[in-house]
Image: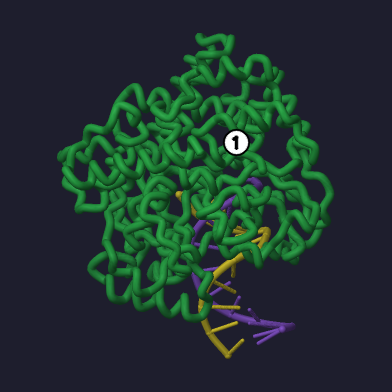
Chain colours: A green, B yellow, C purple
DNA sequence: GAGTTTGAAACT
DNA sequence: CAGTTTCAAACTC
């Protein structure tokens, strides 16, 4: 109830922002709503140097990968990706996906903290689909400072991570293609596949994926979609039972992510990024036709993922300090989040939009960096639960582990840790609902500890964590 | 940075 | 639908 009320509040506040153009939000809504306000602002043409600059977060590029749309949506908005400078020809709801507030140092810092924390906890699985940055940051910050972790060390890590972010802002944030023959009009082209125009950093040749060739782009896109309606859909989908989850989270069941089509790896053993499942940070499923699958995130045959759960546990507890370094040293996994937007970044609820489920609010927030979006109708594709396969959702271990490792009697402390709606956690709200609760794989046995459950439920900011 | 490997996408 | 070709990213050296 409280969560829903807060949602309404947010919506209300958001509308207010929309209405009067004021960026000031209610006292209840601080950062999160600023972000929302930013999102809203971003629905209008971006004016460099304007107030919307606040919404830019250098280094946290948001790829619109896997965003899909109906052809009729194409011209909704030609939106400029503020963080990358790209323009997206995706629908406004998806194009509004942007980094949270800009250069505000506190925010960056908190984000970095959050990210480093997350990666710390994720360890090997650093490619966690990041929740809404503001959400994560707000939560993580409070979380961080409520723990007894050595802050000096973290500060070092923080700085490192910040640098990495900065660097990412110059490179990864703007994913560059290198197409030579496809004219960037085929799915070979990452930019095209991601629904963004190629921009200067791209090394493509004879590129047609530019605003000046908008018609061509859209026509081609349409053609590809006609051939394969899911061509631009997220490759990695969150499995959920139904679209109804959108409106009623209580109906959702634990879900896992799976590649929508499965891979077809022959030689990589699904252990390299050649494998789309692996690249997307998901396990292979029965739908995969891979051979010799050793996918670390879950094998096709359903055997336990390699070096995931146990490793995570160890890393979290024993290697906390080295985790960031480890992540830094392991770009292969570490960059999943950045390199594979389809996996970690917010995706347009293509099927949602197609099913005409209005998500006026969630679409904005969800699109902020990296919330894992559940594709409503994806249930028909894979039902990993049925497969009994482990699911490694990188966002999951973080929270799951967090709640697991923290003694329950400490939880109130954590809750006190400003995990209030005003911390910005809220900003993830409806979307984060799609960050489905972790599977039982991560220690959450079917008979979950009621204590944790209660706690989770009592955190309005993390509806997605609520396990039903 | 060049060359190779890989598997998805596109084509037949 | 299966086999083949094309393609660009991932990877290796």
In the image shown, does A61 or A132 lie closer to the viewer? Answer: A132
Q: Quadrant of residue C4?
A: bottom right
Q: Quadrant of the C terminus of chain A?
A: top right
Q: Quadrant of residue A451?
A: top right
Q: Is residue A322 left or right of residue A269?
A: left
Q: Is residue A263 left or right of residue A95?
A: right
Query: Which class describes the residues within 10 Å of circle 1: few (<14), some (14-19), or many (20+)?
Result: many
Image x and y of residue A33, in percent:
33, 36
Image x and y of residue A369, in percent:
43, 43
Residue drawn at point x = 27 percent, y = 46 percent: A15
Residue drawn at point x = 36 percent, y = 57 percent: A93
Q: Considering the numbered disc 1 on the image, is that residue within a helix, a strand or a loop?
A: loop
Above or below residue A153? Residue C7 is below
The residue indicated by pointer 1 is A126
The numbered mark 1 sits on a residue in which chain? A
Residue drawn at point x = 42 percent, y = 41 percent: A7
Q: Is residue A222 left or right of residue B2?
A: left
Could you tell me if residue A173 is visible in this image?
Answer: yes
Q: Is residue A440 left or right of residue A245?
A: right
In the image shown, does A176 or A418 lie closer to the viewer? Answer: A418
Residue drawn at point x = 47 percent, y = 54 percent: A347
In the image shown, does A140 or A81 lie closer to the viewer? Answer: A140
Above or below residue A366? Residue A426 is above
């Amino acid at each position: 109830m409280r969560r829903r009320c807060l949602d309404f509040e947010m919506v209300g506040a958001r509308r207010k922002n929309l209405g009067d153009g004021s960026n000031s939000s209610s006292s209840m809504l601080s950062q999160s709503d600023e972000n929302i306000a930013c999102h809203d602002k971003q629905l209008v043409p971006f004016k460099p140097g304007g107030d919307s600059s606040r919404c830019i977060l250098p280094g946290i590029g948001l790829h619109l990968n896997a965003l899909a749309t109906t052809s009729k949506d194409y011209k909704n908005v030609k939106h400029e990706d503020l963080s990358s400078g790209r323009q997206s020809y995706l629908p406004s709801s998806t194009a509004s996906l942007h980094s949270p507030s800009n250069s505000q140092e506190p925010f960056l810092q908190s984000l970095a903290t959050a990210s480093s924390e997350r990666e710390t906890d994720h360890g090997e699985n650093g490619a966690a689909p990041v929740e809404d940055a503001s959400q994560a940051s707000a939560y993580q910050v409070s979380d961080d400072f409520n723990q007894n972790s050595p802050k000096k060390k973290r500060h070092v890590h923080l700085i490192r991570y910040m640098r990495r972010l900065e660097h990412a802002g110059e490179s990864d944030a703007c994913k560059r293609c290198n197409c030579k023959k496809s004219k960037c009009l085929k799915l070979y082209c990452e930019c095209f596949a991601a629904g963004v125009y190629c921009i200067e950093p791209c090394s493509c040749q004879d590129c047609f994926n530019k605003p000046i060739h908008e018609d061509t782009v859209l026509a081609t896109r349409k053609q590809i979609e006609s051939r394969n309606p899911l061509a631009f859909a997220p490759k990695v989908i969150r499995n959920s039972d139904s679209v109804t989850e959108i409106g009623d989270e209580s109906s959702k069941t634990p879900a896992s992510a799976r590649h929508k089509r499965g891979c077809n790896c022959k030689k990589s053993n699904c252990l390299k990024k050649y494998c789309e499942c692996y690249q997307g940070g998901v396990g292979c499923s029965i739908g995969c036709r891979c051979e010799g699958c050793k996918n670390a995130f879950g094998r096709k045959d359903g055997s336990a993922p390699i070096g995931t759960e146990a490793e995570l546990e160890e890393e979290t507890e024993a290697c906390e300090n080295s985790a960031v370094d480890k992540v830094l040293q392991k770009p292969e996994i570490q960059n999943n989040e950045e390199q594979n937007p389809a996996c970690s970044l917010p995706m347009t609820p293509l099927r949602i939009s197609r099913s005409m489920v209005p998500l006026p609010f969630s679409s904005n927030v969800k699109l902020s960096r990296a919330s894992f979006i559940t594709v409503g109708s994806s249930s028909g594709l894979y039902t990993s639960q049925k497969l009994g396969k482990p699911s490694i959702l990188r966002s999951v271990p973080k929270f799951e582990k967090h709640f697991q490792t923290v003694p329950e009697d400490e939880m109130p402390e954590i809750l006190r840790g400003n995990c209030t709606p005003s911390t910005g956690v809220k900003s993830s709200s409806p979307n984060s609902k799609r960050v489905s609760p972790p599977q039982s794989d991560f220690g959450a046995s079917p008979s979950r500890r009621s204590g944790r459950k209660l706690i989770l439920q009592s955190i309005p900011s993390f509806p997605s964590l609520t396990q039903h």
